[in-house]
Image (cartoon, rainbow, N blue to C red):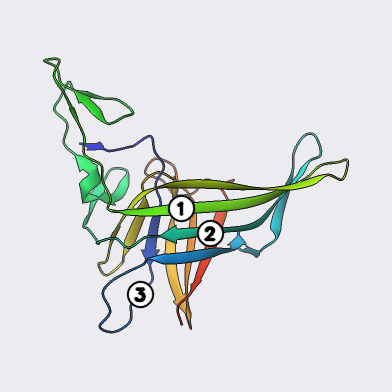
Amino acid sequence: MMLRGLAMPMVALIAAACTIFGPGDASSIAGQYDLATVNGQALPCCTLTDSTGQRMTYVGGSLTLSEARPERFDETPAGAHPHSCVHEIPNGAHVDTAGVVKLPDGSTYQLPKCGNGTYTLVIAIRYDDVDGASRTVADTSAGRYAWDDGANPIVSLLDDGLSGGITTSQGSVNVTVAARGFGMGPGPTDARYGFSRVTN
């Protein structure tokens, strides 16, 4: 069994027990979520200083999810992954980083793309130099995602290595994601990003 894009990070957002969908509404998690916290602290926060004395502070960001049909997730040794991303590869075959499978007889085929929605993730950090200069840099990544609308909905951002959960509060949906290792939870030094989207 092989997970497409295993070298690519992924994000899992797990919904809380209460539903994030309105009665009678089609299941959807689409929308823009604004970065509200990092490591549980409200922005701006979590200043780090490097060896040169430059200070880095989280100041903003967003997670935008397009509309996407839900799909089943399969349990694998590396955790739950979208069904469209899980492929059985014959013994002796090799898969390159572009998803091309080379069979023992020398023939090749391309694994299909998985996920049916797109996302954009933005994290903005302000850099303050020791000489007083300051600049803000927004790091943006984008890619495909998939999600499951079962009892505990899961979302995977197939091109980033983050995972976490969704909770709801009155008038908002809150998403917390953190880097995850291969089949493991967040490491001790990984930032936890808390995003929020107003729903009414």
- Give the crowd class for mark 3: few <14, some 14-19, many >=20 residues within 10 Å: few
Residue at horizontal 28 percent and vertical 79 percent from the top: 25
Q: Secondary structure at mark 3?
A: loop
Q: Rounded to the nearest whole Å, what is the CA distance between mark 3 and mark 1?
A: 26 Å
Q: Rounded to the nearest whole Å, what is the CA distance between mark 1 and mark 2?
A: 8 Å
**In the rendered view, would you say 93 is above or below 73?**
above
Q: Nearer the viewer, residue 143 or 181?
A: 143
Are dots 3 and 2 in contact, CB under 8 Å? Answer: no
On the image, the x and y values in percent for residue 65 come to 40, 60
Residue at horizontal 36 percent and vertical 78 percent from the top: 18
Check residue 100 in the rendering and tell me which mark sits there, or answer none.
Answer: none
Are dots 3 and 1 in contact, CB under 8 Å? Answer: no
On the image, the x and y values in percent for residue 116 come to 27, 53
**In the rendered view, would you say 135 is above or below 24?**
above
Q: Secondary structure at mark 1?
A: strand
Query: Callout 2, which amino acid?
Result: Ser
The residue lying furthest to the left in this view is 105
On the image, the x and y values in percent for residue 132 come to 87, 45
| Count of numbered labels shown in the rendering | 3
Check residue 17 in the rendering and tell me which mark sits there, or answer none.
Answer: 3
Are dots 1 and 2 in contact, CB under 8 Å? Answer: yes
Q: Nearer the viewer, mark 3 or mark 2?
A: 2
Left or right placement of residue 199 versus residue 3 in this view = right
Query: Callout 1, which amino acid?
Result: Thr
User: Which residue is under mark 1?
Assistant: 120
Quadrant housing residue 91: top left
Q: Nearer the viewer, mark 3 or mark 1?
A: 1
* Residue 188 in sight here: no
User: Which residue is under mark 2?
Assistant: 62
Query: Callout 3, which amino acid?
Result: Ala
Q: Secondary structure at mark 2?
A: strand
* Residue 74 in sight here: yes
